[in-house]
Image (cartoon, rainbow, N blue to C red):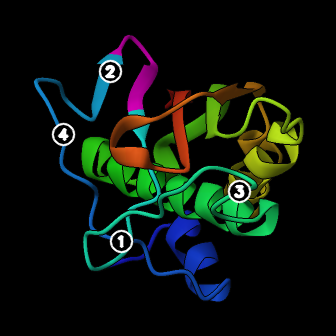
Amino acid sequence: MHMSNVEERLKSLGIKLPEPPKPQGNYVGAVTYGNLVYLSGSGPMKDDGSFIVGKVPTDISEEEAYQAARLTGLNLIATLKTHIGDLDRFQKMIKALGMVNCEPDFGAQPKVINGFADLMVEVFGDAGRGARSAVGMGSLPAGISVEIEMIVEIK
């Protein structure tokens, strides 16, 4: 069985994709419309099924939140792989929305969401760089620190 180029890149980066998170409500993890895949908001779920929780910077640091955003990116890639089969079908990151559970005076949401954005470029190269928003939220489901949704183009 041949490994895709993206899977080879993941392996060379020492990255093992997690099991994709199961939707926590009445929705699906991804929907394809034409050549676009819309991925539902995902959070920083760890291998044991627990989530990285807490408000930035009170409960967790900006660096810990960066890592939470990176983990969220891994969960989104895992969801995408389950949905489309072969990650080499990834064509382009179109748009990502990164939400950070943070205190009202915290203003470094873009730096936190770079944890996700940096991972996408590591894995998909320049095609992993797209439009994005990074915003602060007063709370997120179950107290998670970061939630990210994305839209990607596939071949």
Quadrant hosting residue 70? bottom right
- Is residue 14 found inside the magenta-colored segment of the image? no
Q: In the rendering, at what x and y percent does residue 66 appear?
A: 73, 60
Q: Which residues are magenta?
A: 33-40
Q: Residues within 10 Å of mark 2 (few under 14, many from 20)?
A: some
Label 1 SS = loop
Q: Which residue is mark 3?
A: 58
Vertically, is 103 above or below 136?
Answer: below
Q: Is residue 108 visible?
A: yes
Q: In the rendering, at what x and y percent does residue 16 appear?
A: 46, 81
Give the residue at x 64% y 39%: 100
**The N terminus lies in quadrant:** bottom left
Amino acid identity at mark 3: Thr
Vertically, is 2 above or below 149?
Answer: below
Q: Which residue is mark 1?
A: 18
Label 4 SS = loop
Q: Is residue 94 visible?
A: no
Amino acid identity at mark 2: Thr
Which mark is drawn over residue 24? 4
Amino acid identity at mark 4: Gln
Instruction: Give the mark nearer the N terminus: 1 vs 3.
Output: 1
Instruction: Give the mark nearer the N terminus: 1 vs 2.
Output: 1
Instruction: Give the mark nearer the N terminus: 1 vs 4.
Output: 1
Q: Which residue is mark 2?
A: 32
Give the number of the mark in front: 1 or 3.
3
Quadrant hosting residue 10? bottom right
Label 3 SS = loop
